[in-house]
Image (spheres, helix red, strand yellow):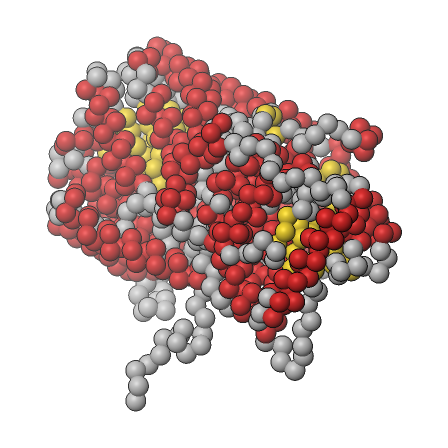
Amino acid sequence: MGSPKTATESGQQRDPLIHRETAIMTSHKENSKNSAHQDLAPNRDMEGLVDVAIEQADTWLEVKETAPATKQLADMVHDPHGVEFTFSFVDRVARPEDNKVAAEEFAKIASPFKRTDPAPEFLGLIDTILVTAGSIAAPILPNVVMPIARKYLRSTVGHLVLDAGSETLDAMLDDAREKGFTLNLNLLGEAVLGEAEAKRRLQQTIDLIRNPKVEYVSVKASSVVSQLNHWDFRGSVDRLKDRLRPLYREAKRAGQGRSGKPTFVNLDMEAYEDLDLTLEIFTELFAEEEFLDLEVGIVLQAYLPDSFEALQRLTEFAKQRVAQGGAKIKVRLVKGANLSMERVDAEMHNWPQTPYLTKAEVDANYLRLIDWVLNPENAEAIRIGVASHNVYHVALAHKLAEQRGVAAQLDIEMLQGMAPAQSSEVQKKAGNLILYTPVVRKEDFDVAVSYLVRRLEENGAKQNFLYALFTPEEDDDTGLTPMENQENRFRKAVSERWDTYHGPRRTQDRIQEARDKVGATGGSIPGNFANEPDTDPSLAQNREWARTLLTPEADPGPAQSPLVTDPAEIDKIVQRAVDTHDEVWGRKTGAERAELLDKVADSLANYRGRLISAAAFEADKTIAETDPEISEAIDMAHYYAESARELDRHLGSKFTPYKVVVVTPPWNFPVAIPVGGVTAALAAGASVILKPAPQVLRIAEVFVEAMREAGVGEDLLQLVNADEDEAGKRLISHPDVESVILTGASETAQLFRSWDPRKVLNAETSGKNAIIVTPAADPDLAVEDIYQSAFGNAGQKCSAASLIITVGSMSKNKRFMNQLVDAAESIKVGRGTDISTYMNGIIEAPGEKLDRA
């Protein structure tokens, strides 16, 4: 017998995306194993504390959660329909302002006459009766039932999201202080899409700080500045520092009335794209003399493998700060709560997922961070907040700090309202305990939805510690109780903490790719198409690359192609195309044509920088608009290569290509659309004549140069700068041109048709794109989609939102309208060559249509 075949050898194609993720992690693990022990020389005393920590954790776990709200939460996550019902209620019933719309949704999910899923069991008998009765009555009396339903929801989740009203909040702060807890307040609000809302949120946070009972506040950089431009890293850092200085000044002033203790402000973050930005703001702002004596904090998310290097950077900064006479800093270590968002972002751009792929890796990294930083050599400069409900991790951190003599370096932190009995037991052993506490004003309660959804998602995951905590003592698939499984996970995390990879999972480097001419990187292979990754501006090397593309030296200069005005010259051009088809291109197989198109894709990838420069200087397009367009052009080449291969597979039929195809693209997408037309025609076996829009002739010259470098001959693809008069008409109506691919105005298509009614005309003409906003919509997401669609590339595309249709009460929704106006007024308008620009100007003076609009 021969050796067994691999999946690829036996004919089964591997998914290149999965293969790439696996290859990345294999490389990362090898690098980690080779460097972690040698470079960091980790202390191994943590292993000796594992059993002691488990014993301590088990004593905390003996305490039963008796609070009704906690019990209901536990029942909800274990009810087969509980999480889905709660998601639906929070999102579809509590969010809409329109009582009638909310009532209809309430009936759909809860009425026995309309619901499709069984009634959830976690509500209990009385609540089930109330919810059922309310869902039946809601469509009849929406203005009576829905305010009661929303009030019911607020009372149900009131232990998770607290009322930001001053009297209510003061009472809760007093109660927490008496019980030995400190509340870390995080003010929730509507999405910050414009500067008016950003300034309002900043002022509300300052008002919190001014409350003499408030000791601790968290604030996200993205909540005080709108429309951050991650390409413009330096500009974003400066904007944020200017916006944050008044807040921290207020924190210092607040301390004057508290025996000299300022309000502690923690700089929070959510998205990976904000990691470098937040670190830079923090280290620059708090190196300033004005804030040198202020103790401040920052959050790191352990589900990011980048967090270890970030912690090392912050620790070094803290030591330098203290050496200059400054105060300590604090780093709050969390696991991370935005995994779904990070996955979606990665999928949309074909990037590797930034967080670890497994919970085991997250736990191991979390313990590595604790192990590395809790040390006497760090204790004088940096405090650590271990924020977790996993009592095994909490107990280990507590025991480790005690053994190393740095107990004062450690804060234990948990979530407000989650397992309060357990929190109380931990507080008795660890001393003061900090509770992360979201607060929201009554009138803004619907904005708490996203926070609640994240918490529900976390607690509904079987690998989550809180899920195990609330799970009845019964065996699962492994034959162990959920908590026994958690103990095993804990032991494994300890043993693997220094072997788990650390460092960025995204290593895209456009500088290196351009230097080495690596070609396309999406992983497309014959028989398996994959999208090309966009450029990731969260990576420093890519931002540096982008800056070089917008310098005067990168300007490709004016177009070189002479204007063709003589119809006789057009005849010669068409004849060359016919001859090339007959003698060369038309005789090649689909596989042979595909091979060339794959080379075109590689060459376009190598020309990415030059194409961005050409688009910025000639078409005034921003890098944020052009970069994904180039990815699309590369995708076009790969896609049509696959289409060419497919033509060979049609046995029993003969494909007869057009001899000559003319491609007449528009100016608004000067790379993707013409490349798509050209590669489609080449894939089908035709010779191609490209007539670019005159406004973007230089861009066409650059991508044609890329195609030439890939091996596309000068007669196979001819760029013709034909006039808009007789020469242009001759090109379109020439009898040897069998097909025309047009993307442009409807009037242009009608004109082409009038010249030759029998010509094969593939015309994609202009349209009007509308966005419909219903009363059930999330207004934050609706506004974000609208302004990005309407104002990207100054709205110069048929897919731009040019019409907003509001349904019913949404037309009177003040929040929606105010947010939309705020977002539009806050857009940074400028030249495409200015990296800080969000919206570039229009390509030429307005024509009659635009003036009329």
Q: How many marks?
A: 0
Q: Is residue 603 left or right of residue 734?
A: left
Above or below 23: residue 36: above
| Residue 672, visible in the rendered structure | yes
Which residue is nearer to you in this view: 269 or 413?
A: 269
Question: Relative to residue 382, is residue 766 drawn left or right?
Answer: right
Residue at (75%, 41%) from the top-left corner? Answer: 565
In this orientation, does residue 69 appear? no
Q: Quadrant of residue 419?
A: top left
**Residue drawn at x 53%, y 52% as measured from the top left:** 708
Q: Residue at x 28, y 60 (%)?
A: 484
Q: Residue 640 sits in which quadrant?
A: bottom right
Q: Residue at x 55, y 37 (%)?
A: 614
Q: Position of residue 845 (x, y in %)?
A: 73, 27
Give whichever of 232, 123 is nearer the camera: 232
Query: Residue 322, how many percent across, how many down?
Result: 21, 21
Query: Residue 643 placed where, x, y %?
Result: 59, 65
In the picture, the quarter occupied by the C terminus is top right
x and y percent of residue 354 in the render?
Answer: 40, 47
Quarter of the image with the N terminus in it? bottom left
